Image: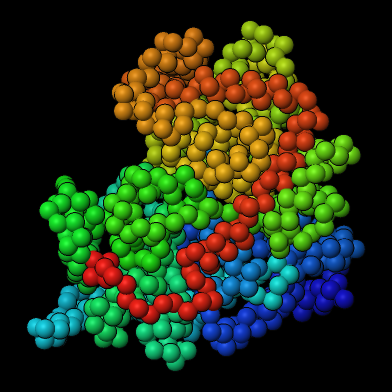
Amino acid sequence: MQGDLLLKYVRSSTGRPPKAAGPRQWLAALVALVRERIGEQWSRSIGAEAERRGKCVYYLSMEFLPGRLLIHALRNLDLYESCRETLAEHGVDLSVVAELEPDPALGNGGLGRLAACLLDSMANLGLPAYGYGIRYDCGLFAQEMVDGWQVERPDPWLRYGNPWEIPRGDLVYPVGFGGRLVDHGAAERPRYDWTGSDEILAVAYDLPVPGFQSQRLNTLRLWSPGAAHELDLRSFNEGNHAGAFSRKNAIESLSQVLYPGDASPAGRELRFKQEYFFVSASVQDILRRFRRSGRPLECLPDDIVIQINDTHPSLAIAELMRLLLDRHHLDWEQAWHLTRRSFAYTNHTLMPEALETWPLQYFEKLLPRHLQLIYEINDRFLRGVARRCPNDGALVRRLSLIDEEGERRVRMAHLAIAGSRRVNGVSKIHTSLMQRTTFADFAALFPGKIVNVTNGISFRRWLHEANPELVALIRSRIGDRWLSQPDELAALAPHADDPAFRTAFRAVKQRNKLRLAELVASDCGISIDPNSLFDVHIKRIHEYKRQLLKLLHVVALYDRLRRDASLPISRTVVFSGKAAPGYAMAKLTLKLIHDVALRVNADPAVAGRLKLVFIPDYGVRKAQVIVPAADLSEQISTAGHEASGTGNMKLALNGALTVGTLDGANIEIREAVGEENFFCFGATIEEVAKLRAEGYDPWRHYHGNAELRAVLDLIASGHFSPSAPDLFKPVVERLTSGGDPYLVLADFASYVSCQEHVEANYLDADDWTRRAVLNTAGLAKFSSDHAVRRYAELIWNAGAREERAVPAFTAAE
C-alpha cells in the first residue's frame, strides 16, 4: 500500500516515471509521502489544541539541532521498511537518498540538541508545544581543516531549500530597533509610546515535530527577517545598484549565521539584535495565539508557559512587559504578575564568562523602552530585597540586574531569574552549585524557586535511528515499549548475564565500528582497525572540556609504545568538534591534535597499536555514526564546569563505557549504571575548590611527574611541529606558567592510571560487553521523555490551572 503511494508521488511530484527517477526525485517523493501523513496529524493536533483547556508550552531557544527528518519520520510513522523495500525494488538505496536531505544548521552542540530532544518528547507525550528560534541561512559554520587549522566556511544548508518547512506568509510581525520614547500618560500613571524605530519584519517558517507513533505533532517555528521595502528604487535608478539593496542586506544579516563573531563591536551588536528579533516575534505570536482563544489576559499563566533555554532569550521578559503595558494597557502590578507567572528559565552554565551580560549602551541605542522597563523592574525588585534584608547594601549590589562595576551592563541571568516562576539546573550537582554558589542569594531569598531537571536525550533519535541493529536486538528480548515508555529499557539488564546476548551485542558493536571506519577513511583518508578500542572524545572544543588532557594521554601512550611495543591493547582515539571562530587556544588545540596525529599515524614503531584521528565538521549526522561505534566515552571536564552533558548519555545508551570526572550528569549516570561500570578519576568539585583556594601550582605536577614532564617537553620541543618548533609553546605555557586554569596537570596522573584500568578491563571482551549492556539498560531514566514529565509536573503545571492569588513578596519579585 505505502509502496504504491510512493510510486504515485514519484510521478506526481517529480513528473518522472519511477524507472527514470534519480535520487533527488525519490527524495522529493518520500518527503511528499511523509508530509501528507504528518499533515493530517498536524491539522488534528491544531484542531485539538483549539478545543483543549490545558497549557501550551512555548520553548524559546537560540539553537535547535533537529537533525535530518526523513529517516526519523519514516521510523516514527512505521513507514521505513515498506519504503526501503520499494526503493530497493527499483535499484535505489534509501540510505543514499537520505544523505541528500539537508541537515538543518540551526545549532552548535548540546544546547540545540537538548532543545530538539525536548520538542520530540513533548510531541511523544501529547503535550501541546511550539519551539521558537531563528531560521539561520548558514547556521554556525562548516568546519574545514586546512593543514590542521580550522577554517570556517558558510554552511548554506538552504541551498536547495528545506523540503519540510512551510512558509507562513500570514504570520509576519514588526520588530523595531532604535527610536525614541514619548510619554502620553498622566503623572500618576505614565504611558509611553516607542516611536520612530527602524522596523523590520519577522516572517514565520514552520517545521513539523512528529511524536513517535502518536497522533500528536508539534511545531518548530523559525523566524526569518525581511524588509518592508526591499529596494530603494531611487538609488537604483541613479546608478547606485549595490546601495539600493543595502538596507535589505543589513536586515537579512540578522539570520545569516548563528553566534556571529563577537571579537568586534559590530559582531556583538548583531548578536544582541538577533536575540531581540526572535524573542519579539515569538512573544507577539504567543500573545496572538492566546488572544485568539477569547480568554481575558488574567488567564495567560493558566494557558501558557514560556521556557527560556539559557540566557539568550531573556529579553522576552522585558518584551512581554512592554506589550502588556503599552499595547494592552495593563497597570504595572498586573503586567508583572502575569509575566513572572508565565516564564520559566533553564540555566546551562555557571561560568562567569558564559553568563550573558549586555552593555547599557546597546539598550540606549537599540531598545530604549526595554531599558526603561529593566530599570523599573530592577528598582522594584531591589526595594523588595531591601525590605527583606535591610542594611545589606552588598546583597543589593549582588542581586541587582545592573552590574555597576566598570562598563555598566545588564545581567541577563538575573533578569531571567527575577522574571520567572521557576528556575532549573540541568543535573543534580549543577543545581546544587546554583543554589550554593553563583545564585545562592536568589536561592536564600526565594526558597524552592531553583529546582533540578536533569537533561535527557531522545531514545528515538539516538538509539532507534542511530543504531537500528541494536534496537532489533533489544526488541528480540524485551519488545519495543521502551521507545515510548523509556523506563522499560531497564528490563534489558538481566540479559547482560546471557552469553548469547552478549555475543550478539558485541557483533552489533563491531558492525558499527566498521561503519565508523568507513567514515574515517572517506573523511580523513586514514585506515583504522575496527578491532581496536575506539576511544571517543566528541564535543565542542573548549579548554574546560579538556581535549588537552586526552591529547597528553595520547602523547604519553605514544612515548610508551616507542619504548615498549608490548602494551596490552590497540587503541584508536577519535576527536571531533568545532572551536568558536575567535577562540585562539581552542584552534591551537585542534592544530596540535592534527600534528600529533601526523607523527603518531606515520611512526612504524606504534603501527597497529595506536591511531589518532580528527573527524571534521561534527554534527548530528556524523554523531549518529560515531556514537554507536564508541567503546569508551570521554567525559573528562574539570569537575564543576559541565552543567550536565548529553553526549555522555548518548554514548552510554549505545553501550560505551564512560571514563569521566564527577561532574554534571556523570554523577547520576555512574549511580544508574553502577560504579563498577564507570571509570572514575580526577579531583572532585570540593577538591578543585580546595586546590584553587590554596593557590594551585601546576609546576608542582610538572616537576613531580616524570612522564608528564616528558610529554610537555616533547610538545614544547617542536617534536610534533619540526617546521615551526615554537608553535605549541603557548599550549605548554598555558598549562604551566599560565596557571593551568582547568587543572589538566593536576588530574593527569589520576587520568593515566584510570586509563590503565580501562586497558586491563578491555582485555576481557566478554566482561566488557556485559558492562556495556548494563550501561545501555541503566540509561532508562535519562530519556528526554523523563525530563519533559518532570518539567510538566515541577515547573510548567501542564494541564493544571495556575493559582491566581498574588503571593507574598510580589513587589520584590
Q: Percent position (x, y) of residue 729? A: 40, 20
Q: Dividing the image into 4 quarters, which one contains the C terminus?
A: bottom left
Please report the residue visible at 66 percent of the width from the left and 32 percent of the height from the top.
Answer: 676
Q: Is residue 86 above or below residue 284?
A: above
Q: Quadrant of residue 91?
A: bottom right
Please report the residue visible at 38 percent of the width from the left and 60 percent of the height from the top.
Answer: 449
Q: Dividing the image into 4 quarters, which one contains the N terminus?
A: bottom right
Q: Is residue 422 left or right of residue 520?
A: left
Q: Is residue 712 left or right of residue 264?
A: right
Residue 58 vs residue 571, the one in the foreground: 58
Q: Percent position (x, y) of residue 490? A: 73, 50
Please report the residue visible at 86 percent of the width from the left and 72 percent of the height from the top.
Answer: 3
Q: Is residue 61 above or below residue 669?
A: below
In the picture as drawn, the residue positioned furthest to the left comes out as 187
Q: Percent position (x, y) of residue 454? A: 53, 52
Residue 600 vs residue 711, the one in the foreground: 711
- What colouring method underlies this structural image? rainbow
Q: Percent position (x, y) of residue 368? A: 20, 69
In the picture as drawn, the residue positioned furthest to the bottom comes out as 294
Q: Is residue 604 above or below residue 575?
A: above
Q: Is residue 558 above or below residue 23?
A: above
Residue 35 seen from this side: yes
Residue 310 seen from this side: no
